[in-house]
Every structure is written in structure tokens, then in C-alpha cells.
Amino acid sequence: MKPVALLLHPPATISSAALRFSSKSHLRKRPLNISCFAVQSESTKVEVSSKPEYKPGMLDDFFLNLFRSKMVQEVGWDSEKPGYDGLIEVANRLTMKGKSNSDTIEASVRILIALFPPLLLELYRMLVSPIAGGKVAAIMVARVTAFTCQWLMGTCTVNSIELPDGSSCQSGVFVEKCKYLEESKCIGICLNTCKFPTQSFFKNQMGIPLLMEPNFNDYSCQFKFGVLPPLPEEDSILKEPCLEICPHATRRREVLSKMSATQCPKA
């Protein structure tokens, strides 16, 4: 009778087997879903934590070549190295050419002026700089600086700064880590071919006060358009010690091993 009973009730046996197969199939699929979810979660974490680096484009190459060509004209010499490395060598030659730091600063100002078409700077100083007490011009140049100078300084963003009257204004530019300082390795090159001439250029040629505050510990720099800088001879930044990796101070230490070389000889 048992064989007959089995034959009379085959669906129960098939249903049980199908249930077991379905259960096993379901268990096999579940780890796959968990695995995919884990990979997606890990990928999301990487995207959040990673910060995209600034990558130079064709426009940056144009600015680099233009700036370098004007610097070469002023120095009367060019490096055999291409690109940014060659620019740094020309900047080094610029600091060595001048008889004094003032000569280097004046030469650097002439380079900045040569980057602009004739009359443009004068028209900007006459027509734009006086608007709203200079705030409009300061905001404009902050944005232009952040857009056009990342090839030279690295990643930078417009930020809010406090003006002398106590108000805040979006006329600041924060450079996260200055490539020019990092590659030149010299406080003197930073001060005499960048900070002091740039401050002088914006104030005298465009009518916009500018204070630049480089940080020689983390290589960041804060631009403050609309803020008057102290006189160069009164600027406390001149008291900054030389960088350990400064090539000029290193050579001086080798020649004058008994002499203290805490300050960059070009600063």
C-alpha cells in the first residue's frame, strides 16, 4: 500500500523538493546582494574622503608661457628646462641679476605690467577702482586671480576677509599650498618676485590695495584685496627664518660655515 500511496500523492514530494531547492537558491543569492552593497558603500567613502587635485589645462599652459616669456625678456636669459621647472630657474636668475632686493622687486613689477595691454591698467584704475569705495574692483580682481593663477600657485579659492572698516568682503583668495614657493624653496624669491611686487603692482597700477600673507610653515598664502600692506621695511615677514631647503642659504652655509644663516640672504 505504501508504494500506491506514494504514487497517489506525488505533488507533496515534488513540492518539498522544490521548497528545499528554492530555499538553497535564495540563500545563495543573499550573500551576493550583501557583497554588492559593501562594495558600493566602500566606493562612496573613497569619493567623499578623496579631494580632486587641480589639473592644468590648455589655458594654463598659455598663461605659463606668456609669463615666462615676459620674465625672460626682463632677465635676458632663458633656461633649457621646459615648463614650470624652467620658469623657476629664470626666477632664480632674476633674483641674482639685481644688485639689491629693490632692483628685483622693480623688475618683477615691470614683468607684471608687461602682461597687460596698454592703457588697460590705467582705465581700470580710473573707471573701476573708485566704484563703491574700491570694493567692486577688489571683488573682481579676487575672482580673476583665483581663475587665472592656479597654474602658478596651485589650488586656490575666493574667501571672505575683514576690511579695515570692520566689514567683510568676498575679496580674499586663499592659496592652499603655493606651488611657486614649494618649487623655488626660497623665501627671498617669494618676497622679492611675488609678494612685494604684486602688492605694489595692484596698488600703484590698478588702484587696489593688497596684503599678501604667506605662511612659510604650510606654504599657504592669503590674499587680501582691499587691505593696505605695511611698508616693506616695516613688514614683520622679513624677520622670518630661511627655509631649511633654501638653496641660497645652503650655499651660504657651505661657504661661511661659522656664520649664522637664519635669514634668507635674498630676503
Image (cartoon, rainbow, N blue to C red):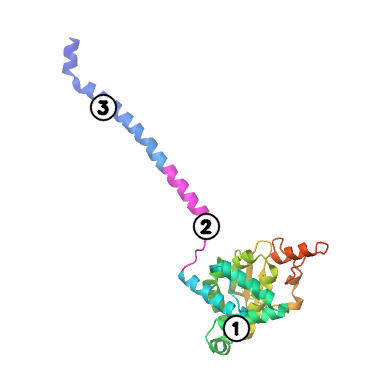
Q: Main secondary structure of the magenta part?
A: helix
Going from N to C along the chain, the mark reached first, 2 or 3, is 3
Q: Which residue is mark 1?
A: 134
Count all numbered tags in the image, as a single digit: 3
Front-most of 249 and 171?
A: 249
Say if the magenta span includes residue 63: no
Under mark 1, the amino acid is Gly
Q: Position of residue 14 (x, y in %)?
A: 22, 24
Q: Within the image, what quadrant is residue 22 found in?
A: top left
Front-most of 25 and 256?
A: 256
Range shown magenta: 37-57
Element at badge 3?
Answer: helix
Q: Which mark is residue 18?
A: 3
- Residue 146 visible in the displayed image: yes
Element at badge 1?
Answer: helix
The relative height of residue 215 versus residue 104 in the rendered view (above or below) is above
Q: Which residue is mark 2?
A: 51
Q: Residue at x 46, y 48 (%)?
A: 43
Q: Which mark is residue 173?
A: none
Q: In the current view of this chain or complex, which residue is farthest to the top?
A: 1
**Image quadrant for the C terminus?**
bottom right
Element at badge 2?
Answer: loop
Under mark 2, the amino acid is Lys
Q: Nearer the viewer, mark 2 or mark 1?
A: 2
| Label 2: few (<14), some (14–19) or many (≥20) C-alpha neighbours in 10 Å | few
Q: Residue at x 58, y 83 (%)?
A: 113
Q: Within the image, what quadrant is residue 240 found in?
A: bottom right
